[in-house]
């Protein structure tokens, strides 16, 4: 959140403090830090403003934008705080801080011998839910995540998440085979799918009324493996977390493979929209994702987005 500081040191210090300081103290510190970060965010502030307006479907006044940005960065700070607290919590504390709807879609898939693929937006605190699946329920969970820079920060985060009981796979050429092995071994797979990261295949969709690219991986895996694609969101709910699991997306073959991937990805985009609209200020996507974002920032539109309307 503070680029001028060494990222690895900052994250280690945050994890140390979150696991030892009383919740009300660490929460207050995060609130102050998040407010400062929102004021110094530069281009990221512009993207947050645009995303909140996308999700709400209305133009915000200057005061509304300022408040929305502050709340979004506050939610982003809480995501880190709650994640960093997890290793210090026992299974009962995790369970007490979690409610859910639609969990039967996950258990039905596991009972049928087809571990599900959970398709999530960067919303609320998904790692709490992943830890709940592993520590409270004893399920195997594999998460595909974006590689971070510098590499030592990614290695630290990978080790941290694996300490919570997850297997972590980095986006890249080895991700596909690793995910297939995970599904064959009975693991639930989690895919954050509301933006494309470098190295990931993508397809064009309409997302919040504009054309952009979203990852092709979830649809490709669902069509090839038969594993149910379950849209999932995890919201902050007061001091707790609440997960919503939607029914499986239709992955019956209807045409050529490429067209089926595009169709299923478009359906997933609509599901992700539905989740984000319920809590737009918990949506912590800080990078430009649409051609219009780049134009608003005065940047060249990347080549892969130039043909989109």
Image: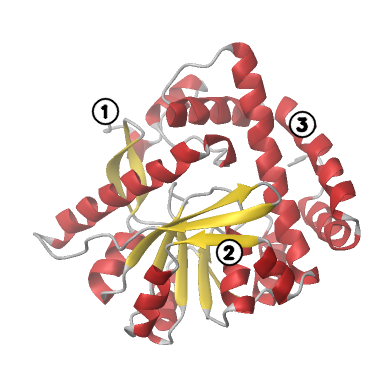
Which one is earlier in the sequence, the residue at label 2 or at label 1? 2
Query: How far apart are the two marked residues, 3 and 1, measured between alpha carbons?
Result: 35 Å
The residue singled out by tag 3 in the image is 35
Q: Is residue 278 left or right of residue 8?
A: left
User: On screen, 107 above or below 229?
Assistant: below
Quadrant for the C terminus, please.
top left
Count the numbered circles shown: 3
Residue at (65% x, 75% y) in the render = 162
Residue at (44% x, 28% y) in the render = 54
* Label 1 neighbour load within 10 Å: few <14, some 14-19, many 20+: few
Q: Is residue 185 left or right of residue 154?
A: left
Residue at (69% x, 56% y) in the render = 150
Residue at (64% x, 14% y) in the render = 63
Residue furthest to the left in view is 255
Q: Secondary structure at mark 1?
A: loop
Closest to the observer: 78 or 4? Answer: 78
Closest to the observer: 205 or 303? Answer: 205
* Label 2 neighbour load within 10 Å: few <14, some 14-19, many 20+: many
Nearer to us of marks 3 and 1 is: 3
Give the image location of residue 103, x and y in percent. 45, 67
Mark 3 and 1 residues: CB-CB less than 8 Å, in contact? Answer: no
The residue singled out by tag 2 in the image is 129
Q: Is residue 44 left or right of residue 248?
A: right
Give the image location of residue 62, x and y in percent. 61, 12
The residue singled out by tag 1 in the image is 309
Mark 3 and 2 residues: CB-CB less than 8 Å, in contact? Answer: no
Q: Secondary structure at mark 2?
A: helix
Residue 61 occupies quadrant: top right
Query: How far apart are the two marked residues, 3 and 2, measured between alpha carbons?
Result: 26 Å
Which one is earlier in the sequence, the residue at label 3 or at label 2? 3
């Amino acid at each position: 959140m503070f680029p001028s500081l060494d990222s690895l040191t900052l994250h280690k210090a945050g994890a140390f403090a979150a696991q030892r300081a009383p919740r009300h103290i660490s929460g207050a510190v995060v609130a102050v830090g998040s407010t400062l970060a929102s004021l110094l965010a530069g281009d990221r502030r512009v993207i947050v403003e645009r995303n909140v307006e996308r999700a709400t479907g209305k133009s915000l006044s200057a005061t509304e934008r300022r408040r929305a940005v502050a709340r979004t960065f506050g939610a982003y700070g809480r995501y880190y705080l709650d994640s960093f607290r997890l290793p210090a919590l026992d299974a009962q504390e995790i369970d007490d801080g979690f409610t859910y709807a639609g969990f039967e879609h996950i258990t039905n898939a596991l009972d049928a011998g087809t571990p599900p693929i959970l398709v999530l937006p960067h919303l609320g605190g998904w790692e709490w839910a992943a830890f709940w699946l592993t520590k409270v329920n004893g399920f195997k969970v594999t998460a595909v995540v974006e590689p971070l820079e510098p590499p030592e920060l990614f290695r630290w985060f990978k080790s941290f998440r694996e300490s919570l009981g997850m297997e972590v796979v980095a986006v890249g050429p080895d991700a596909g085979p690793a995910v297939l092995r995970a599904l064959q071994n009975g693991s639930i797979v989690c895919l954050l799918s509301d933006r494309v990261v470098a190295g990931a295949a993508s397809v064009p969709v309409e997302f919040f009324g504009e054309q952009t690219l979203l990852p092709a991986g979830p649809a490709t895996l669902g069509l090839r493996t038969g594993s149910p694609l379950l849209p999932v969101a995890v919201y902050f709910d007061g001091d707790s977390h609440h997960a919503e699991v939607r029914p499986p997306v239709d992955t019956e073959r209807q045409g050529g493979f490429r067209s089926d991937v595009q169709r299923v990805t478009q359906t997933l985009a609509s599901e992700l929209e539905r989740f984000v609209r319920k809590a737009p200020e918990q949506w912590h996507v800080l990078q430009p994702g649409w051609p219009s974002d780049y134009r608003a920032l005065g940047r060249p539109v990347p080549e892969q987005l130039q043909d989109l309307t």
